[in-house]
């Protein structure tokens, strides 16, 4: 689905979207706002690259970061829910992962956790293993996946 179709679906549903991005560094927000007219359905994007930013801007609990690590579904959930709580949006997507280079045995390069939160609904989270594609490719794949999650949530 194209970003323009996603924007149209959000507009028709009367929903505003927010993003909470870590490893994508604002690429999801940039993709949405690259389309003219997105301002009536895109509320804001949070780029929370550091753990401190996740805590300060989104309300991610330090205990969750300590227990689970930044690249985890629980942190992605709290990021998405925090984006809803700190915005005028009714739908939020969150992305946190290891774009590379690097990673570890337990959290390899290319692992990205996503969450989708909707006002009045349950927050969904998932992990995608993109593999060691290289930093640029992992970020691009994560951006495309986040946009697809939003599209599915909008039924587009």
Image (spheres, grey):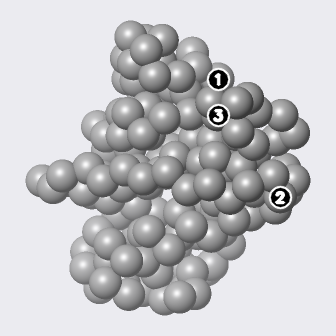
Q: Nearer the viewer, mark 3 or mark 1?
A: 3
Q: Nearer the viewer, residue 70 or 6?
A: 70
Query: Most extreme residue toward the front, as rendered?
Result: 105
Q: Residue 13, image x and y in percent?
A: 25, 79
Query: Which residue: 29% across, 69% down?
Result: 15
Label 1, label 2: how far apart the Cα atoms are: 23 Å
Secondary element type, mark 3:
loop
The numbered mark, 3 or 1, whose residue comes first in the sequence reads: 1
Query: Which residue: 46% across, 63% down?
Result: 42
Left or right, 50 with respect to 39, comes to: right
Query: Which residue: 32% across, 59% down?
Result: 91
Label 2, label 3: how far apart the Cα atoms are: 15 Å
| Marker disc for residue 133 | 2
Secondary element type, mark 2:
loop
Q: Residue 72, image x and y in percent?
A: 48, 35
Question: In this figure, which residue is indicated by the disc labeled 3?
Answer: 107
Q: Nearer the viewer, residue 103 or 144?
A: 103
Q: Nearer the viewer, residue 103 or 24?
A: 103
Q: Nearer the viewer, residue 82 or 67?
A: 67
The numbered mark, 2 or 3, whose residue comes first in the sequence reads: 3
Left or right, 133 with respect to 1, comes to: right
Asked if the residue under mark 1 is in contact with the one under mark 3, i.e. CB atoms within 8 Å, the reply is no
Asked if the residue under mark 3 is in contact with the one under mark 2, i.e. CB atoms within 8 Å, the reply is no
In this rendering, the answer to whether 35 lies above or below 96 is: below
Count of number-bearing discs: 3
Q: Nearer the viewer, mark 1 or mark 2?
A: 2
Which class describes the residues within 10 Å of circle 1: few (<14), some (14-19), or many (20+)? few
Question: In this figure, which residue is indicated by the disc labeled 1?
Answer: 50
């Amino acid at each position: 689905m194209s970003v323009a179709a996603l924007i149209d679906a959000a507009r028709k549903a009367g929903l505003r979207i927010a993003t909470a991005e870590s490893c994508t560094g604002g690429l999801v927000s940039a993709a949405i706002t690259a389309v003219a007219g997105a301002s009536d359905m895109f509320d804001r994007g949070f780029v929370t690259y550091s753990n401190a930013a996740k805590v300060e801007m989104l309300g991610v609990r330090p205990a969750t970061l300590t227990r689970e690590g930044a690249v985890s579904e629980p942190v992605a959930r709290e990021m998405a829910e925090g984006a809803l709580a700190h915005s005028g949006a009714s739908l939020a997507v969150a992305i946190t992962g290891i774009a590379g280079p690097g990673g570890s045995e337990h959290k390899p390069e290319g692992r990205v956790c996503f969450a989708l939160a909707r006002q009045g609904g349950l927050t969904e989270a998932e992990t995608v293993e993109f593999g060691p594609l290289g930093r640029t490719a992992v970020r691009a794949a994560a951006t495309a996946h986040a946009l697809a999650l939003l599209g599915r949530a909008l039924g587009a």
